[in-house]
Image: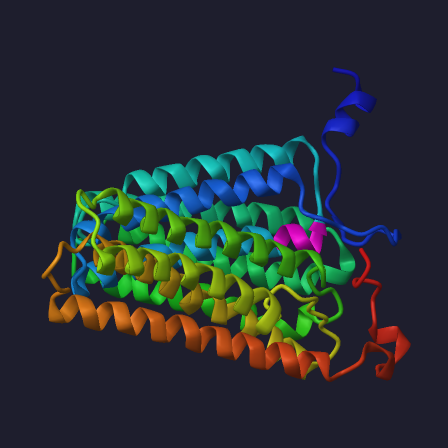
Amino acid sequence: MPIPALRQLIQPTRLWPAGTHAPRRATWSELFFDLIFVAAVSEVGKPLSAGYTPEGVLRYCFLFVLIWWAWSGHTLFTTRFHSDDLVQKLFTLVQSFIAAVMAANARDALDSRSSAGFGAAYAAMRLVLVFQYLRARRLPETRALTTRFALGFGIAALIWIASAFTEAPLRYWLWTLALAIDFATPWLAERHGMHVPPHAEHFPERYGLFTIILLGEFIAEVMRGIGSQEYWSVPAASTAFGGMAFAFFLRWLYFDGAGGASERHVHSPEEARRFHVWNYSHLPLFLGVGVAGVGMKHLIALQEGQHLHQMEAVIFTASLAVTISSLAVIGFVSKRASQVPAASLPARQVPHYAGQ
């Protein structure tokens, strides 16, 4: 292949924006990528549907956290950097395949061999992200940031790989250590990323799209509950309608009430902290929606005269409380963010992210 043609296929990673004021919207490829990860979440939730117990919830939460964190890491990178060459496309394909591998290894208990495979697949996902950050390290203005991300995620990935070759309970300790490093890395790199924040419009948009798809999974659980009813009763019909209405309420509360998908500008340490709170608050929100969806299906599927078991009722109620509390936090930091006008900040600190 001629060198010019090769250069067209393999291009260096660059910061977004690249000197243009055109709005940046989600692409079909990004929507497809999000759908793959939500499909993986759906697979993780199938055992929870069969065992709506504290143990089932704990297992679901752990596996969900890894899937969400893998998706979030990729999304954060692609909304901060612009890379659409052949290498990036291959990275995205590999990450999509790994998400499918993670879902295929999410059926058994946490001390099983398949769960060890789940951790190893997640490690491979993080290593792909490390390679992406190493590619972006050539940019002088982001070298400190990309180095810390690559180092932190790389160390965590090695621990995840080591955990695949250990048995419980040592495996759990390694998982805890690796996850702590994974979650701490963005905080430790915060001051290096303030001058190159993720796209203020596009990053929240991706979270909003993920939320919509996840609410679609909630409605799918309502439909499964409806389908399990052989003879309809007034309580069953009213519960099914209430479940659908609750999904509509969550959609309104997230987008309109809490402003969950509104623009996120990062110009100061305080805004950076609010950004992290907004980001991490989505984890309990998504967990709550996922667990509540399964509980709603069980509630709708009850035959006349039946009731949820006490522990099932506790889990369902707690998931609703977590969902609403997370939305309250997201709404609070969104309101605080809107109180600081960009015009009040020094011009040199305001990159042109809002309209790109």
When the figure is inspected, residue 124 is found, relative to residue 93, above or below; the finding is below
Q: Where residue 140 appears, x then y in whole percent?
A: 77, 58
Q: Can residue 155 be seen in this view?
A: yes
Q: In which quarter of the image is the C terminus?
A: bottom right
Q: Quadrant of the N terminus?
A: top right
- Asked if residue 80 lies in the magenta stretch, the reply is yes
Measuring 37% from the left and 73% from the top, which residue is drawn there?
322
The quadrant holding residue 283 is: bottom left
When the figure is inspected, residue 226 is found, relative to residue 239, above or below; the finding is above
- Asked if residue 157 lies in the magenta stretch, the reply is no
Considering depth in this image, is 251 or 192 the residue closer to the camera?
251
Measuring 88% from the left and 53% from the top, which residue is drawn there?
19
101 sits left or right of 173 in the view: right
Considering depth in this image, is 184 or 282 the residue closer to the camera?
282
Q: Where residue 291 appears, x then y in whole percent?
A: 31, 61
Return the residue found at the far front: 234
283 sits left or right of 304 in the view: right
Considering depth in this image, is 139 or 231 the residue closer to the camera?
231
The quadrant holding residue 159 is: bottom left
Considering depth in this image, is 27 or 230 the residue closer to the camera?
230
The quadrant holding residue 147 is: bottom right
Q: Can residue 119 be seen in this view?
A: no
- Looking at the rendering, the stretch of residues picked out in magenta corresponds to 77-81
Measuring 67% from the left and 46% from the top, which residue is drawn there?
26
